[in-house]
Amino acid sequence: MTHLSDETGERHERRSGGRTDRRQANRSDSEAYTGFERRLSDRPCRRQGRAPSDDQVKSRRFVKEVLFFLIVVLSVVVYKNFYSVPDKPISSVSEDNETALTGKFFRDCPSCPRMTIISAGSFEMGSNDGLNEEKPVHIVTISQAFAMSKTEVTQGQWKALMGDNPSKFTVCGDNCPVEQVSWEDAQAFIQKLNAKTGKQYRLPSEAEWEYACRAGGHHVYCGSDNLDVVGWYGASVAGWDDPTKRAPGNSNMITNPAGRKQANAFGLYDMSGNVWEWVEDNYHDNYNGAPADGSAWQGDSTKRVLRGGSWFYGPSYARSTRRLMDAPELHNDSVGFRLARTLP
């Protein structure tokens, strides 16, 4: 018979023995942890920083100097191509230097439009696949180099010379094309610019315009077969009454800053789209009897020719060969102009 006291003694002995075993186990764990901690402390700290060597300092300084040099060079290139006036004005263009000068930009005054030299040459004008007014295709030979403005005349250039701004889209800024200028307004601007510079600025002839637009190529538009690359245009007329069938265009139905799209091979911007451009010629229904020397085609018509399409009109109007005509006194927010200049 087991007494209560005996059972109590056994439980006490078992508890005492258990505490002894646990103390030994805890002591062993503590010694093991201490040893592990000691081993960790023996290792070098990998996160400890070190001062850069002299070679590293020199290498970093060299990289910074190279980057600074590249920024300076890029700034100079941008300035020369977009803002500067050449040190030496274009004094003469001959067969000997014409090729070298082709595509070169110059200005006759700080506020004057930038001009690029267009070399002489021949091309096929018109399109047998287009409208009747674009036919027939005929050979035109531009016998003398001339200059054409890199962009359409801007609001800033107009204000600097004329003192006002007739444009509707003034919010677009000084670098946007001036619009709402008639053919007669363009002639007044040219007369004043010639008086200021002593040069022979003028509107390009229609043949000169198309020759400069094509720039030696046969693209659908001036410089590309993809209008989004080279021009700002509006909704297509096809489906005009049905918005679901209307191509929206890329202009946001407003003029856009000049020179933002890709230039053609002659370095001219916005020859397709943005604003229609007046040329010197009277309008004729077709090219039968058109001059073959690239001169302006005068006549009895009271209308003047417009080329290039605009922010409002669809892609078909921005084609290289597309023609439009209107009264020389027309003021419209999709009409501006581009300059030509007789050389030297």
Image (cartoon, grey):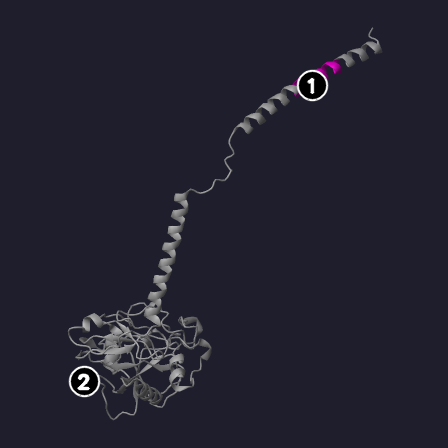
As drawn, the residue found furthest toward the top would be: 1
- Residue at 32 percent of width and 76 percent of height: 114
Label 2, on which residue? 291
Amino acid type at circle 1 is Arg
Do residues under tags 1 and 2 come within 8 Å of each other at their CB atoms? Answer: no
Relative side of 163 to 25, left or right: left
- Residue at 40 percent of width and 44 percent of height: 56
Would you say residue 306 is visible in this rendering? yes
- Out of 3 and 199, give the one closest to the viewer: 199
Residue 20 counted in the magenta span:
yes
Amino acid type at circle 2 is Pro
Would you say residue 227 is visible in this rendering? no
Q: Position of residue 317 (x, y in %)?
A: 33, 77
Question: Upstream in the sequence, badge 1 or badge 2?
Answer: 1
The kind of secondary structure element at disc 2 is loop
Circle on res. 314: none
Instruction: Name the quadrant of the N terminus.
Output: top right
As drawn, the residue found furthest toward the right would be: 4
36 w.r.t. 246: above or below:
above
Corner quadrant of residue 197: bottom left
Q: Position of residue 285 (x, y in %)?
A: 25, 86
Label 1, on which residue? 23
64 w.r.t. 155: above or below:
above
Q: Position of residue 165 (x, y in %)?
A: 43, 84
Magenta span of residues: 14-26
- Pointer 2: residues within 10 angstroms few (<14), some, or many (20+)? some
Predominant SS of the magenta segment:
helix
Q: Position of residue 43 (x, y in %)?
A: 52, 29
Instruction: Name the quadrant of the C terminus.
Output: bottom left
Residue 193 counted in the magenta span:
no
- The label nearer to you, 1 versus 2, is 1
Disc 1 and disc 2: Cα gap in Å? 115 Å
